[in-house]
Amino acid sequence: MERNDSRFVHVVASVYIYPNLHPLTTQYPVELINIRHHYTTVRILSDVSLAFAPECITAILGKSGSGKSTLLQIINGMIRPDQGEVKIFGKPIDYGNIQAMRLQIGYVVQQVGLFPHLTIYENIALLGKIAHRPTDVIRKRVEQLMNMVQLPLLHLDKYPYQLSGGEQQRAGLCRAMLLEPPVLLMDEPFASLDYETKHSIYDHLIDIQKSEPRTILLVSHDWEEAQILADRFVLLEHGKIKTTGDKATIEQTKYNYTSRK
C-alpha cells in the first residue's frame, strides 16, 4: 500500500497523532495498514488502518463478533492477517522471529492464563527467565509490580487457586508488565470480575499508567470502562472502523450506538 492512502492518513491525522506531528513521518508504537482477515467464509476484518499514539490508552469497542479480539491477536502476531501489514515501532512484524517482537508487547486476557502448577512468583517471573534477565533484577521488578497493584508479597509463594479472581487478574497484569513493554494489549481482562473489584483494578491501572506510561490497547464492550480508562477509542462494527474519537466525543457516540434498534 502507498503511504499516501487517503483513508490511512485521515484516521491517523484526525485521531491518533499529537499536535504538530506529521502522520507520514511519525513512528507509532502500533500501525495497522489495510488489514483484512476472515475465518472460513466469514470476513472478520475489512480494510482496517489505524495508528496508535504513544503513551495513550485506546479502547477498542464493539459488539461480539465485531473483530476486536482478532485485531489484538493480529497485533500480537498470534494470527497472520490475510492481507495488510502490522508495524511495531515502524518495523513490520517478522513472523520468522516473532518472539523478539513479543518482548515489546504485554498481553492480558480475561482468563488470566496463570499456570496452575507454578507459584505466583514463578508465573510473574517466567518471561524474565525466558529473556535471560538476572535473578536479582527479576525479583526486584516482581516485588515492585506487586506493590503497584497492592498485592501482598506473601502471595508470591501461593498458587493461583489460592487467590481470588481479582487477585489473579492483578498478578496477570504484573506478569504482562514484567519486562516493561512499551505496548500493552488487554483483551476484556475485567469482564468476569464484579463491579467493586473491577473499579479497584481500574484505579491501579490508572496509577501504573501515570508512573510507567505506555501504549495500551484495551478491548472492551463496556462503555463505562472505556470512559474511565481510555484517552481515545475505536468503535468496530462488522469488522470495519465505525467511529474513532477521544473523550470529548465518546458520550455522543455511546448514545447513538446503544440507542439504535
Image: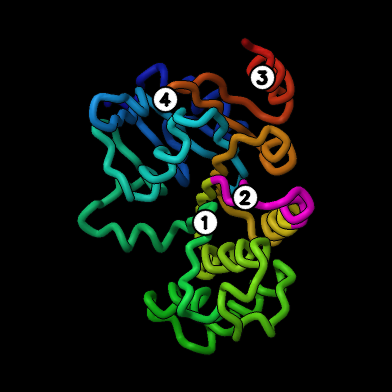
In the picture of the structure, the residue carrying the numbered disc 1 is: 111
Residue 118, position in %: x, y?
48, 80
Q: Which numbered disc, 3 or 2, marks the residue that appears first in the sequence?
A: 2
In the picture of the structure, the residue carrying the numbered disc 4 is: 239
Q: Residue furthest left?
A: 96
In the picture of the structure, the residue carrying the numbered disc 3 is: 258
Q: Residue furthest bottom?
A: 136
Q: To which quarter of the image does residue 128 belong? A: bottom left
For the residue labelled by badge 3, is the local secondary structure a helix, a strand or a loop? helix
Position of 163 relative to 42 (above/below): below
* Count of labels in the image: 4
Label 2 close to label 1 by CB (< 8 Å): yes
The amino acid type, in three-letter code, at marker 4 is Gly
Position of 196 relative to 21 (above/below): below
**Magenta segment range?**
188-200
Q: To which quarter of the image does residue 240 belong? A: top left
In the picture of the structure, the residue carrying the numbered disc 2 is: 192
The amino acid type, in three-letter code, at marker 3 is Thr
Q: CA distance from mark 2 to mark 4?
A: 24 Å
- Asked whether, in this view, residue 72 is left or right of residue 56, the answer is left
Quarter occupied by the N terminus: top left
Q: CA distance from mark 2 to mark 1?
A: 8 Å
Colouring rule applied to residues:
rainbow
Q: Nearer the viewer, mark 3 or mark 4?
A: 3
Q: CA distance from mark 4 to mark 1?
A: 24 Å
Q: CA distance from mark 3 to mark 2?
A: 22 Å
Q: Which numbered disc, 3 or 1, marks the residue that appears first in the sequence?
A: 1
